Amino acid sequence: MSKSWRLIPYSVHDAADNMAIDEAILDAHLSAQSPPTLRLYGWKPPAVSIGYGQKLSAPVEERIRSHGFDIVRRATGGRAVLHSHELTYSFVGSATSGGSDEDAFLSESVVKAYKQICEGLIQAFQELGLELSLGASSAEYRNAHDCFLATTSADLHYQGKKMIGSAQLRRKTAVLQHGSILLDQPQDLMRTLLRDAASKFADGGEVSDATKFSVDPERTDSFLGESEENMNQRHANLYEILHEKVSIERLQQSMKAGFETAFQRPLVEGGLTDHEKALAAQHRIKYQQPLGLKT
């Protein structure tokens, strides 16, 4: 495998393509046909991605789609993520290897591998003058339908507010981690999508405003019992903190520099291989299927 790693520059795709491409890179890397890869991308139309094992009721899905958002089930775990006014990254590498030690640069420990990859993000944001820090696991995470309403050790925060949420998938020796970097996402956009959907039960009955934010562990479309004040501070936005709209080109340069610093390897711009394109076309079929319910 080449000592140079790959940077796939920012591009925009629909939800099925984005998830299919990430998985194709993972599979190609597992078979030693692709180097460690950092990819940056956007979503058109905007979408909500849900975790592999996350349940989503029909009223929730209908409400999200009625607002013009696509929905896709990720191969990774975690909760719902809104892909609008954000930048998504994915990183693929090896945690173990039958080859040399330099091929297996990520820890076999999931938690430690998260920290290694997140160090690339931390270094990237230092390039922009921001100090991000890792979050800590929260017991409430399992009850939260919205990824950015809960904290895990895979999250990055700015002064206590979550800015980047990530999820990871391991397939034998290959590791995929992808995540959402919030740029200028309205604080109430995801709340509106999920709350409006949660306000109606499957039988069409209404719930009162007083109960919309109550926690029911048996329902997956409920909210944490957050105060309105806390809900208004759901996350941190990069543009708001910097008081400027940073170009995608500058963000890409910062991400490249950050990962090069963290892993001490050069990143060379490149595109998908023909093999990866073929794999992505195969994977796309399943990502276009109805969500169904995972258990």
Image: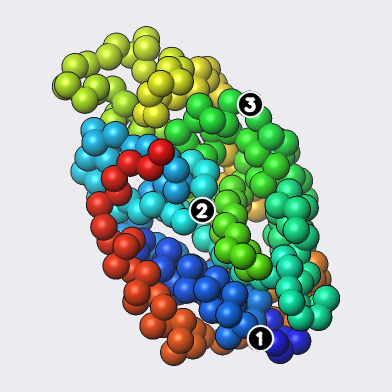
Eye-nearest disc, 1 or 3: 3
Q: Is residue 17 left or right of residue 260?
A: left
Q: Secondary structure at mark 2?
A: loop
Where residue 26 appears, as percent x and y from the top left, is 55, 71
Amino acid tagged 2:
Thr
- The vertical placement of 178 against 153, above or below, is below
Where residue 65 appears, as percent x and y from the top left, is 24, 46
Q: Tag on residue 161?
A: none
Residue 31 in view of the camera: yes
Q: Answer with the quarter of the image where residue 60 lies.
A: top left
Q: Residues within 10 Å of mark 2 (few under 14, many from 20)?
A: many
- The vertical placement of 219 against 95, above or below, is above
Residue where numbered disc 1 is placed: 268
Q: Tag on residue 139?
A: 3
Q: Tag on residue 76?
A: 2
Q: Answer with the quarter of the image where residue 274 lies.
A: bottom left
Q: Earlier in the sequence, mark 1 or mark 3?
A: 3
Eye-nearest disc, 2 or 1: 2
Q: Earlier in the sequence, mark 3 or mark 2?
A: 2
Amino acid tagged 3:
Ala
Alpha-carbon span between mark 3 and mark 2: 20 Å
Q: Residues within 10 Å of mark 1 (few under 14, many from 20)?
A: some
Who's the residue at 48% across and 41% down the image?
79
